Amino acid sequence: KQKGHTIMSGKARREYLAIIRQRYATASKRHKHLILDEFCQVCCYNRKYAIRLLNAPESMSTSSRRHRSGAKPKYRDEALVRFIKVLWRASNLACGKRLKAMIADWLPAYEQYHDIQLSSHIRRLLTSISAATIDRLLCSERATGTKLGLATTKPGSLLKKHIPISTSQWDQTKPGFLEADTVAHCGTSMAGMFVFTVNTVDIATCWTEQRAVWGKGEQGVLNAVKSIEDALPFPVLGFDCDNGSEFLNWHLMKHLTERPRPIQYTRSREYQKNDNAHIEEKNWTHIRQYLGYERFDDVSMVAQRNTLFMGPWRLFFNFFLPSVKLIEKRREGSKTIKRHDAPTTPYRRVLDSQHVSDEVKQNLKALRASLCPFELQHQIQSSIKCILSQSRTTAQQQSRILAGTPHQESTTP
């Protein structure tokens, strides 16, 4: 309100302007002065601004001349937005900062895989686009959803006194210090036998390796750890795990410690998931987001999953999906301020490390040159669809068997 008068809405002002403009155009100079006074009083306009509105042609009305202030948007090209959306979905809904870091590696593969030639103008825009702009372009596409899994860690108390507790693994900058955990694919029931995933991550480079095992037997987990150790591009220097019996056993302890160069074997505190924060994060981003919470209780799925894990899976995550690392964390008053490094793939971190030999780096570069991220992503999707379809078929067969059991027993003499 202004001096007892109610301010008109924008729509009412435009309607009033359309009517009074006709009177103003045909009035004499003396009457125009009166109409202008009335227009400024009713709409609360500045006098010079009111004169411009009344003298403007009808086709240049306020509603048609309204526009967004600032520079014209330049990232609305259909081909550019399509590439951003395809990249976002192929990376399993990565954030804008990670997508920006991926553009340089994925753009040539995108043109080759989809048989598309982007113009030089769009390529320049993609190299200069910011992470915030990417997030705005994807605003309407984003979807949210969370699920909770089942905790399956059972204490292994036999060796706790022999294995020291370590809570400072995040300070390691040399490749070779691993965090390990198991992910249960049990659905909603822990009954019976089912597939587990042994998941590991290197703290310095974020390089990950996964292996499927049948149950959580000590020998099966040991074989998975041996396979992971052989696949890493650097030697294992440290192995940190939780207090589960699949890791705290004599088989794994002898394998890690009874060798010419023993591996530093440590464990986390009980019921403290933050002690294994690196691997807990990878359990979600590298396992649950792709395989979900289905129950895999067919032993044939172990070999099928390991073929996937040792093939396109490890190549896709380690060579093409960047991640960020926390490099500083401080508290100022009531605020906790975190600072991360630039998004980088594990492959790049290995190349930047001074502790990896030149021969290994050359082999990784040759392997990277032969890979296409979209082809790997397609292979992963096809394998996951096959695995999930097999899991649901098995579940339906078991449901039919259980549903038919009472009827069969009732007919037995």
Image: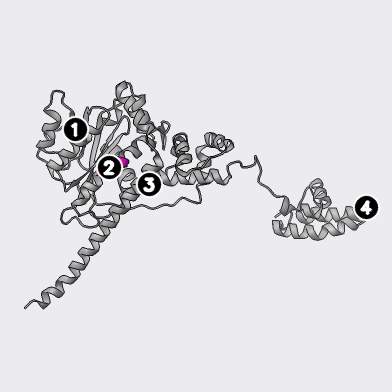
The quadrant of the picture occupied by the C terminus is bottom left
x%, y% of residue 284?
32, 45
Magenta stretch containing residue 310, yes or no?
Answer: yes
- Horizontal placement of 103 versus 215: left or right? right
Dominant SS of magenta comes to helix
Asked if one can make out residue 41 in the rendered structure from this viewpoint, the answer is yes
- Horizontal placement of 220 versus 148: left or right? left
Callout 3–callout 2 Cβ contact below 8 Å:
no
Q: Which mark is residue 99?
A: none
Circle nearer the N terminus (1, 2): 1
The mark lying in front, picked from 2 and 4, is: 2
* Quadrant assignment, res 241: top left
Circle nearer the N terminus (1, 4): 4
Residue range (magenta) = 307-312
**Residue 370 sits above or below residue 48 on the image:** above
Judging by the rendered image, the residue that carries numbered circle 1 is 266
The mark lying in front, picked from 1 and 4, is: 1
For the residue marked with disc 4, what is the amino acid? Lys
* Quadrant assignment, res 34: bottom right
Callout 1–callout 4 Cβ contact below 8 Å:
no
Judging by the rendered image, the residue that carries numbered circle 2 is 309
Q: Nearer the viewer, residue 104 or 157?
A: 104
Judging by the rendered image, the residue that carries numbered circle 4 is 29
